[in-house]
Image (cartoon, rainbow, N blue to C red):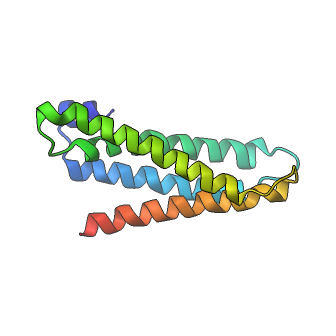
Amino acid sequence: MALYLQNIQGWAPWQMALVLLAGLSAFVPCYLLMFGIGPEPDLWGVLLPASVLWGAGFALSISALMVAGTTGVADEEQGLAAGLLNSSLQVGGACGLAVLTAAIGPGTALAMLYPGVGVMLGFAVLTLLAQVIRGKG
């Protein structure tokens, strides 16, 4: 998608940043919806809309993130930049998972998952704020 939008359609980096912002914005209502999860699965009211928002957020933000992470890097350094970006995503994901797991209480009660949803919502809001602040700077 990133190559199509930039190379074929001629999108500028600032346009890709708006796509990243839209993608990150989709995560906030996704996790807010997950607070509505109950003992019985609510496919139409919670699970499906949250999954669609999560998928859209990921699809929109990952391509723009790759563009942002490699923009301005010399052609011969593109592989290195992409590798560092992917490594950062892996390490960040592992650290985030550790924090998320610590927030979820032990046991099987549904209420023990809500702090984990709160952590994910917090990550989403902080990431969105970082992008907005970065865009203004």
Image location of residue 47, percent across then percent down: 71, 44
Q: Is residue 11 left or right of residue 30?
A: left
The part of the image, by quadrant, that contains residue 86 is top left
Q: Is residue 2 above or below residue 13?
A: above
Q: Nearer the viewer, residue 60 or 122?
A: 122
Residue drawn 21% across the image and 37% down it: 6
Q: Is residue 96 above or below residue 121?
A: above
Residue drawn 26% across the image and 30% down it: 4
Residue drawn 14% across the image and 46% down it: 72
Figure quadrant of the N terminus: top left
Q: Is residue 72 left or right of residue 94?
A: left
Image location of residue 69, percent across then percent down: 27, 45
The part of the image, by quadrant, that contains residue 8 is top left
Image location of residue 77, percent across then percent down: 16, 35
Q: Is residue 55 left or right of residue 19?
A: right
Residue drawn 53% across the image and 60% down it: 123
The part of the image, by quadrant, that contains residue 9 is top left
